[in-house]
Image (tube, rainbow, N blue to C red):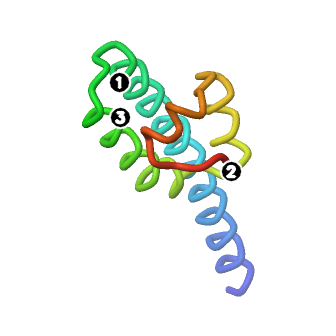
Amino acid sequence: MDGRFLLLGLTIALGATAAADDGCQNELKMFERDVRVARELHERVIWQLAGFNYQRRVSRYCAAEERRGAVNRLKLTDEEMKLLGVGRD
């Protein structure tokens, strides 16, 4: 019976890890979309919303390395980072 609990625990742990990875990729895609929209519209409010979503969602689901990768891909300037209200990790 102990073997079944171990197998169940391992299955749950692996499933949670896979779900977290999927969540991170989804959040990064949405963040990248938000930044593109903010760049197009040049609205401070849009930048603030993108920053809020970054802090609330991306920071929650993604590791620092993944967040840095997204910032590097987007080539966010220091001014854009200030508009987002987030610092560089």
Closest to the observer, 78 or 30 = 78
Closest to the observer, 65 or 22 = 65
The kind of residue on which mark 2 rests is Asp
Q: Which residue is mark 2?
A: 89
The residue depicted at 41 percent of the width and 31 percent of the height is 30
The kind of residue on which mark 1 rests is Ala
The residues bearing labels 1 and 3 have C-alpha atoms spaced at a distance of 5 Å
Indicate left or right for 23 with 88 as reference. Answer: left
The reply to whether callout 1 and callout 3 are in contact (CB within 8 Å) is yes
Q: Which residue is mark 1?
A: 38
The reply to whether callout 3 and callout 2 are in contact (CB within 8 Å) is no
SS at circle 2:
loop
SS at circle 3:
helix
The residue depicted at 53 percent of the width and 38 percent of the height is 81
Q: Position of residue 74 (x, y in %)?
A: 59, 22
The residue depicted at 52 percent of the width and 32 percent of the height is 79
Compared with 8, 26 (above or below) is above
Q: Position of residue 69 (x, y in %)?
A: 69, 33
Indicate left or right for 32 with 52 as reference. Answer: right
SS at circle 1:
helix
